[in-house]
Image (spheres, helix red, strand yellow):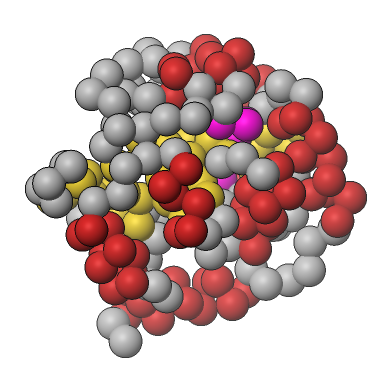
Amino acid sequence: MSEKSSNFAARMEKTTARYEREDLQEAVRVMREGGIILYPTDTVWGIGCDATNAAAVERIYRLKQRQDSKAMLCLLDGPGKLQGYVTVPSAAWDLLECQEGQRPLTIIYPEARNVAPNLIAEDGSLGIRITAEPFSKALCTMLHHPVVSTSANISGQPAARSFREIVPEIRDGVDYICRFRRNDPCQAKPSSIVKLGINNEVTVIRP
């Protein structure tokens, strides 16, 4: 196992501390009612909402001061759900299998569907990451929808690598801040990003 892989595995092991079910339930309740949340993910802290709710997605764009032409990604709790939201080129299964237990990988898939229209890029694609982090995985499972995941920062500013780095403007702009892992000192990094074409064309966006 590479150094990067072992570091990621060690961090995931640390995040298996038991979260409060009430924390999870409140976050899901807020998203079901169209709200937006701050929550820990398998990478940096994220701003999230129900990925099928266009009004909630728009609120996140406004909070981040980001144009909606720069589409945001979302999280799923398992690869078996991918085909409900995107077309999955065959190369994706190989990438997902190779990435298991290593650094998180976001794949941008073609032909997105069944999510908020303003979450989909102009070319019809959508970035999805299968999360292995326990809290964000449980959020997706309980919500029964993908969860938007975008870094908790104003567009153009550095991503917050831990909860303590999230600026007040972002904290004050959400409807709920999850309690789990607020005191986690780990300096998280963003995921790798790969874009796949319908015919298995591969473009590395972020190594």
173 relative to 118 in the view: left or right: right
Q: What predominant SS class does the magenta segment belong to?
A: loop
Look at the image and tell me whether residue 151 can be seen. Answer: no
Q: For this rendering, which residue is in front, 73 or 11?
A: 73
Q: Quadrant of the N terminus?
A: bottom left
Q: Quadrant of the C terminus?
A: bottom left
Residue 204 within the magenta-colored segment of the rendering: no
Instruction: Give the total of numbered labels.
Output: 0
Q: What x and y, as percent, mark residue 186? A: 54, 62
Residue at point 74%, 54% (across, down): 180
Q: What x and y, as percent, mark residue 89? A: 24, 51
Please identify the residue farthest to the right as the structure is shown. 22
Residue at point 50%, 28% (across, down): 115
Residue at point 83%, 45% (across, down): 25
Residues rendered magenta in the picture = 44-51
Q: For this rendering, which residue is in front, 68 or 176?
A: 68
Q: Quadrant of residue 34?
A: top right
Q: What x and y, as percent, mark residue 42? A: 52, 57
54 relative to 98 in the view: left or right: right
Residue at point 81%, 35% (across, down): 29
